[in-house]
Amino acid sequence: MVVEDDENLRIAVAAKLRTSNVEVDACGDIKTADPALRENHYDCVVFDRMLPDGDAIDYVHARRREGWHAPVLFLTARDALADRVAGFEHGGDDYLVKPFAMAELAERVANLCRRAGIFRPTVLSHTDLVMDCARREVRRAGALLTLTNKEFAVLEYLLTRAGRTVGRADLIEHCWDEQTDPMSNVVDATVRRLRRKLREPELIHAVRGVGYRLGTP
């Protein structure tokens, strides 16, 4: 999630992160961001400090007291030592002063995302299918498969819920971003390609009118 009131900067940051294969939601103030931050699990949240409806460190501090753990990166033009210290004291995990290089921002976000995933399994498996999340490798019956980033994300999500039916809307929410039309066929098209690459016997089963389930052959 990127919370930045400067529309041009918000668009540029989101675009840069998307080119780094990060799914991004973006908005311009705390009021708009709050419902999404409470409903969704984000691996990283990028906050501009001074937003139209308040200082983001106050929001983060209050959410930390509620037990919220999402890694937070503050963006700000305030570069005094006291400002940086305040950011960390109020629950920030990283602090980047404007103006900044987009490449550095992307690396800092990637680092925080990795930190968020520290407790996730490194290797996921189901029957003869093995996914090494750290190496980003997928093998079936020992054979290495070549998957796109989106195919990898969909398969990873299905693997973490093996045996359970996963709805199309759920896949869009976790594997795409807010710009994706929920009525589009992106999920079905991605799953079709994934099924072909996984080969027979089939592991991903369609559940009519609902979504997909990773089951047994």
Image (cartoon, helix red, strand yellow):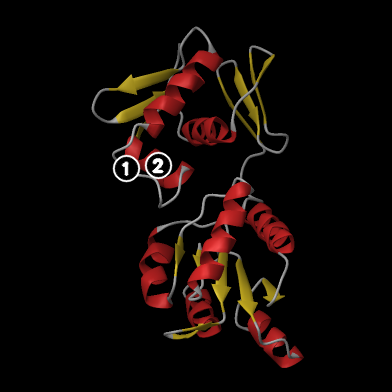
Q: Is residue 19 left or right of residue 167?
A: right
Q: What residue would you read off at disc 1? A: 182
> Tag 2, which secondary structure?
helix
Q: Is residue 203 visible?
A: yes
The quarter of the displayed image where residue 93 is located: bottom right
Residue shown at 40% from the left, 32% from the top: 187
| 183 versus 74 height, above or below | above
Residue shown at 71% from the left, 38% from the top: 134
The reply to whether the C-beta atoms of the residues labelled 1 and 2 are less than 8 Å apart is yes
Please provide percent x and percent y for residue 72. Answer: 60, 69
- Towards the viewer: 163 or 153: 153
Residue, far front: 8
Q: Is residue 164 visible?
A: no
> Tag 1, which secondary structure?
loop
Q: What residue would you read off at disc 2? A: 172
Q: Amino acid at mark 2?
A: Ile
Which one is earlier in the sequence, the residue at label 1 or at label 2?
A: 2
Residue shown at 58% from the left, 62% from the top: 13
Residue 195 disc label: none
Q: How busy is the neighbourhood of tag 2: few (under 14 within 10 Å), some, or many (20 plus)?
A: some
Q: Amino acid at mark 1?
A: Pro
The quarter of the displayed image where residue 208 is located: top left
> Distance of mark 1 from mark 2, alpha carbons?
7 Å
Please provide percent x and percent y for residue 9. Answer: 56, 69
